[in-house]
Amino acid sequence: MKRLLSILALLLPVLAGAQSLTINHISDTHTMVKVSGKDRYVMLPVQENAPEARVKVLSNGNEVLGANVCLAIDKTDYLVPLDLGQWGGSSIILDIKMNQGRSLRRDPSDDVCWSEMTTVPVPDLTNSEKKYRPIYHFSPEWGWMNDPNGMVYKDGEWHLFYQFNPYGSFWGNMHWGHAVSKDLVNWENLGIAIAPDALGAIFSGSAVVDKDNTAGFGKDALIAMYTSDGDNQTQSIAYSLDNGRTFTKYAGNPVIMAADTPDFRDPKIFWHEESRQWKVILAAGQEVQLYSSDNLKDWTYDSSFGLSYGNHNGVWECPDLVRLPFEGKEKWVLILNINPGGPFGGSATQYFVGSYDGKVFKCDDLPTVTRWMDYGKDHYATVTWSNAPEGRTVAIAWMSNWQYANSVPTRQFRSSNSVPRDLSLVKKGKEVILKSTPSKEVEALRGNPVQFGLSTAPVELFDNARKAYELVIRFTLSKKDGATFVLSNESGEQVVLSYDAAVQTFSMDRRGSGNVKFSKSFAAVTTAPTRVGGKMELRLLVDSASIEAFGEDFSMTNLVFPSSPYNTIKMYGNTKADVTLYPLSK
Ligand code: FRU
């Protein structure tokens, strides 16, 4: 029997496709892996705390990709697929430099990555992340995701590209990943869209539909502009004639390379009807810059905005400039993400309301005014869809914070996005504020509603553990009374949501919400200014690892990592609340 098992063990690697990898250790730190056979994917074993190895992919002798991969040394945390299809199935060599510091000297063949590296025809991407994989928020099938990129609506499809590391669930090797949806909530993940090249990694950017073929790539070409993060940051374009399934990079890249600043990135293109021109807004150090173009290739600098305006306690990133109707006219809103410098530490999104004449943005506020778009800790890199139907302005945020994004307690993937939100301008006293409302498509996820009244007695929400639901809480407060709602689970983990009449705020306390230990910056109370008193409505969107709160004049987006779903709600306060509870599912 023992013998049979050992024969089987010998055969297994063959069955698993290992026969197509020939591993040659050239020195202690240099290994070449020849890949042959028909399998399309090499599965790379990753150990998250291993030092990064440099993996060069050579196709017919040319380097076609360089990636940093934490190849497993003594245990494999997970496998990531390297898709050889990108290089047309030609003969491939992986030229790998392992990192062997003095304290890490070892026989190269001892590293487990060599015995556990395999080839497969199709990678198994079954969700292994049972606990915190969101039910209705977008997350990548595997690997790391940060900013949403290149969002554009075309031919009935909402495109969502995203900052993607396919070779580990942490930031690095930036590609654009791609997903499409017909309804903004059910997403089909299409994997890698744009891969790094000699100009650099593919950082954030945007995409537009070139309806009039201004660039000459073809009518209705989908054209993306992204930052090439090389020795300097420059802006490049790529076009797709098959609705984003494949991209061709423009041979004349980069198309903008003006600024002598290390942070010169995140171009957001938009069409300006009055001047019949393309415009781009991008971050340049502590300001944003605006450019114009007739053809998306040749760009002229127009103006800068931002020095001394708003918050500058961090790097300005991912700007957007949108026009929104307001009282029969329109205003322009400049959305600007900043990291760090957020009101509760780390990343956050600020905005400026004003006017734009096709060249210059002017802010309505004094420079000293700072406005935040969301008052949670996990709302970043927010930008809007281009070409959205029905004149809508739909935004989505990366639901994390650079303070701890790389260490949140998930493995197969890291990070998800907020729900899509429709933006509008509303009046709050004398101010005009930017309001985010969950897009109507999110309501399609609602199951049968359950109504109940809430006073101080705790109410169990579901018989069975349910991770995804929505609560709409309606109540009335006198001018001097606050109210507190507590969501909790059977382990006593809780999120405390409070309206404070004295200071007119809403806050969310996640200090006891579950696992908060993975980063000292995670446990926090976030607070939004709001009107407290009279008729109130609070909408809570709860998913496996997040709570998004929407009030009359604020939104607040926070991650949570409870050991089991919150299944009880109770209330403190001199009022009674009417609650509508909707299970949410796709
Ligand atoms: C924002 C950001 C962008 C940059 C990208 C890189 O989160 O830093 O400025 O383009 O991430 O992944």
Image (cartoon, rainbow, N blue to C red):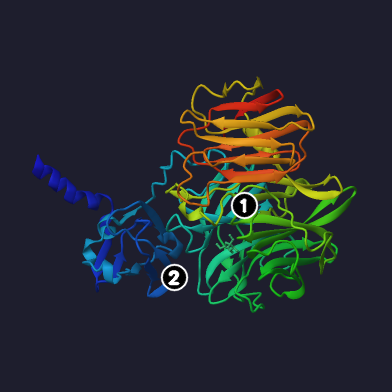
First in sequence, mark 1 or 2: give its number.
Answer: 2
The residue at the point 57 percent across, 66 percent down is 248
For this view, does 329 lie left or right of residue 533?
Answer: right
**Which residue occupies the foreground of this view, 343 or 321?**
343
Report how far apart the C-alphas of labels 1 and 2 lie in the structure: 42 Å
Q: Secondary structure at mark 1?
A: loop
Q: Is mark 2 within 8 Å of ligand 1?
A: no
Q: Decide: is 286 above or below 1.
A: below
In this orientation, does residue 210 appear? no
The image shows residue 64, relative to residue 340, as above or below, that is below
Residue 141 in sight: yes
Foreground residue, 460 or 492?
492
Q: Are marks 1 and 2 in contact (CB under 8 Å)?
A: no
**Residue 3's disc number:** none
- Tally of marks: 2
Residue 573 spot, x, y in % from top left: 68, 27
Question: What is the number of the mark on residue 344?
Answer: 1
- Determine the residue positioned at 63% across, 59% down: 341
Query: Mark 2: which amino acid?
Result: Val
Q: Which residue is mark 2?
A: 64
- Can you give x and y, in whole percent of width and height, for residue 147 in the image? 58, 56
The quadrant of the picture occupied by the N terminus is top left
Q: Secondary structure at mark 2?
A: strand
Q: Mark 1 against mark 2, which lies toward the viewer? A: 1
Image quadrant containing the C terminus: top right
Three-letter code, disc 1: Phe
115 lies left or right of 302: left
Q: Position of residue 295 (x, y in %)?
A: 73, 70
Residue 78 position, x and y percent, is 36, 51
Q: Label 1 neighbourhood size at 10 Å, few (<14), some (14-19), many (20+)?
A: some
Horizontal side of residue 105 vs 523, given as left or right:
left
The residue at 65%/21% (across/down) is 455
